[in-house]
Image (tube, grey):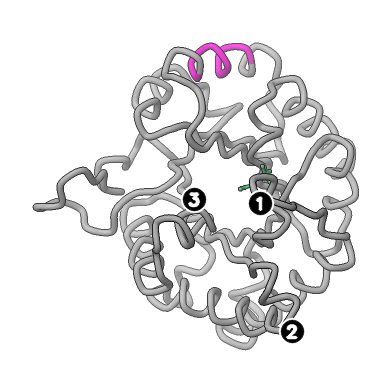
Amino acid sequence: MKTYIVGNWKLNFTVGEASIYLHKLLKTLPNYRDLEVVVAPSALALQPLSLQVDRHKIKLAAQNAFYRDTGAYTGEISFAQLRGMVDFAIIGHSERRYVLREDDKMIAKKVAAAIRNHITPILCIGEIESERAFGETKDVIRDQLIGGLSEVSDDELSKVIIAYEPVWAISSAKSAKLATPDEVGEVVNLIRKTLMDTYGAKASENVPVLFGGSVNASNAGAYLTVPGVNGLLMGASSLILNEFVDIIEIAKRVRA
Ligand code: PGA
């Protein structure tokens, strides 16, 4: 299975800054065969960057899109409009769940819309700090996973990527704590077991599971060696070009 290194730029970089970053990244990176390097710029930058990017080296992801393809939905961008422009879409990120109030039902529709438009959804799931403290992590993970995938058929499961992002470990959290590799391993096992129970062993074994939450060049190696982890999703450290490149290099070494 490929290793995925995904940079989520969130609400950062102007279109010009995004273009300069991409230019430098393209110049630095060779063409890795087993490594999928993905960046998720703001929606505004996707179109120009899609003309600039060399897809052999880097793929683009949307950070979000709406679940209807067309219609009277003022202010929205659809997966249908993004079709051909991006290869991936981050869906269900905790900032959309908790700041923009997206629920599992809406997230499931977005996952289906992405697949319908040939865009690979990166479905983000993860518990908040109090849910972990009250021993609810397993239930939250199962609910978000099964809820988010509720419109995905057995055949379509191979088109999905899951990202485990404990919300308390995301760098923007007030008192972000690092998840230990053991904590990550435990939840990743649960994700794999839930997929297996729901879709069967064959359909579920090829689903990539990524980890995200304050990943940086110092801890990337440890997370990448957790059994069952197939890549990393990062925010803050993907904004620093040198650090992002370091993490890509680490992934190459760890996975060699
Ligand atoms: P972080 O963000 O790497 O800054 O913690 C991860 C994310 O929100 O996807």
Residue 35, position as x, y percentages in the image: 71, 39
**Residue that mark 1 sits on:** 173
Q: Which residues are magenta?
A: 18-24
Disc 1 CB within 8 Å of nearest ligand 1 atom = yes
Q: What type is the residue that disc 2 sits on?
A: Gly
Q: Earlier in the sequence, mark 3 or mark 2?
A: 3
Is residue 159 rendered magenta in the image? no
Q: Which residue position is annotated with label 3?
A: 90
Q: Position of residue 27 (x, y in %)?
A: 65, 11
- Which secondary structure lies at badge 1? loop
Name the one closer to the observer, 127 or 142. Answer: 127
Q: Is residue 37 above or below residue 178?
A: above
Alpha carbons under labels 1 and 2: distance apart: 20 Å
Disc 3, ligand 1: is the CB inside 8 Å?
yes
Instruction: Return the residue found at the far left.
Output: 72
Q: Mark 3 touching mark 1, by CB under 8 A?
A: no
State the mark number for residue 135: 2
In the rendered view of the protein, which quadrant contains the N terminus?
bottom right
- Is 73 placed left or right of 214 in the picture? left
Ligand 1: give its quadrant: top right
**In x, y percent, where is residue 193?**
70, 81
Instruction: Check disc 1 and give the amino acid type.
Output: Ala
User: Residue shown at 68%/73% (left/top)?
Assistant: 130
Find the residue positioned furthest to the bottom. Answer: 197
